[in-house]
Amino acid sequence: MTTSSDTSSTDSRHTQRTEPTLVDPIADEKLERPECQKIYNEIDYPDGGIKAWSVVFGSWCAMLGSFGIWNSVGVFQAYLSENQLSEYSEGDISWIFSVFSFLFFFCGVQIGPIFDAYGLKPLVIPGSIGFVLSIMLFSLGTKYYQFFLSFSVLGGISCSLVFTPSIAATNQWFNVRRGLATGIATTGGGFGGVIFPILIRALIPKVGFGWTLRIVGFICLVTSTVAVLCLRTRFPPNRASGATIDLSAFKDRRFAATACATFMIEWALQIPQTYITSFALYKGVDATFAYQMIAILNGASVFGRWLPGYVADRFGRFNTMIATIFMCAVFSLSLWMVSSVVDGTNMGLMIGYLVCFGFASGSGISLTPVCLAQISDMKEYGKRYGTTFSFASLGTLTGVPIAGAILKAQNGRYDGLIAYCGACYIVCLMFLTLARGFGGGWALRKVY
């Protein structure tokens, strides 16, 4: 015979399973206990299974094209400065890629809330079409304004339409293993950053710049199609989410510090990505190998996106970010700086920097959205994500041109540019430490 208390308990469990998104694990004191939190995680997030991992694969394919191109801008910068745009300065050319990066992240201020309200298909499908079209138009360019309009404007907006929903969708399927899942998804950008520079350098002498980019465009068409087929959301649309910057989120000290840290990451990260090939040519490295250096850096970042994500799920997402950002600062101010100031070509220092920095910098891509998810309600995650990266986009817009201006002021010497990069990472480290302290306390052994 079933008692009324048993029936009540059964009904309660049934309600939780049918409407899991109504439960707030932060507000509910009962769910603060580890055993209850484990039950909530298992109910509300699959954290595995065919559907969940197929979303990760779809996100990986989306990253391969969008972030793979973003990781390859150094190759485009070096090639255009030696060929079609040789009459322009490095600083002028860098605006093409800075505006691309700016729109890549800034458009998230609208895309994030639209994702919350309408899902991902209305974003990913037109974004994929526009992204492939931008590469095709880029291949036809001969003038500065043509490269700017096709790559910077159309490409930046289209990549944002693909990138932002693919990251947000992955976070809806994982909680306990969110760092690992996001890390695996973002390795797609690392693979793209390895494949595209090697492919571009190998094909340009054979088929020319135009057809090389068209081949890249066809590859992106295939990966984007797979992404559209695999990506899906779990949570129902939240039509109450407005398509605006959520300035009220900055009242949360954890969010404000995390957003500032993200700004500094974007201010610094693209400097090595953009200038490492030009730096190698400046130091007398063979042109063929100089163009492959960006592939080495991105190859190391593949492991730097996956492994820190795996570690972060066990030792804390913010803890892991702090450790890897510290490594970025150290490697930039030691290995890269020394290779810059010593006379002649020191391949050992350069390759050491590419591998070490590439690994350490990977978490700046893979763990930033995970840290944001940790301090956000998932129903508002798209808006918070968009707010953060609209703010950080100002860093991507100005970081590379500032580095180019420093390079010009020093008559082509790179030590000032490198010092600027290292200083950005040091400031980022300070903000991450504050975010970790505000959210998890100041105890060194705290997992947060």
Image (cartoon, rainbow, N blue to C red):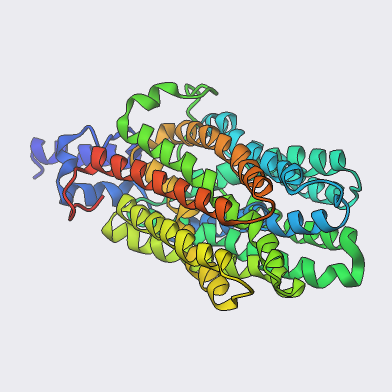
Is any atom of residue 401 visible in this view? yes
The extreme bottom residue here reads 348
| In this picture, residue 269 sits left or right of residue 227 | left
Q: Residue at x 76, y 42 (%)?
A: 92
In this figure, what is the number of numbered marks? Answer: 0
| In this picture, residue 272 sits left or right of residue 140 | left
Q: Nearer the viewer, residue 233 or 159?
A: 159
| In this picture, residue 233 sits left or right of residue 324 | right
Residue 375 on image: x %, y %: 33, 39
Can you say whether 30 is above or below 61 in the image?
above
Can you say whether 217 is above or below 241 in the image?
below
| In this picture, residue 173 sits left or right of residue 82 | left
Residue 126 on image: x %, y %: 72, 40
Q: Nearer the viewer, residue 16 or 405?
A: 405
Tell me where residue 118 sits by quadrant.
top right
Q: Residue at x 56, y 42 (%)?
A: 165
Task: Say which quadrant the N terminus sits in.
Answer: top left
Q: Residue at x 76, y 71 (%)?
A: 287
Q: Residue at x 53, y 43 (%)?
A: 267
Can you say whether 85 is above or below 16 in the image?
below
Residue 57 on image: x %, y %: 56, 60
Is any atom of residue 230 visible in this view? no
Q: Nearer the viewer, residue 308 or 52?
A: 308
Residue 379 on image: x %, y %: 41, 33
Can you say whether 118 is above or below 403 in the image?
above
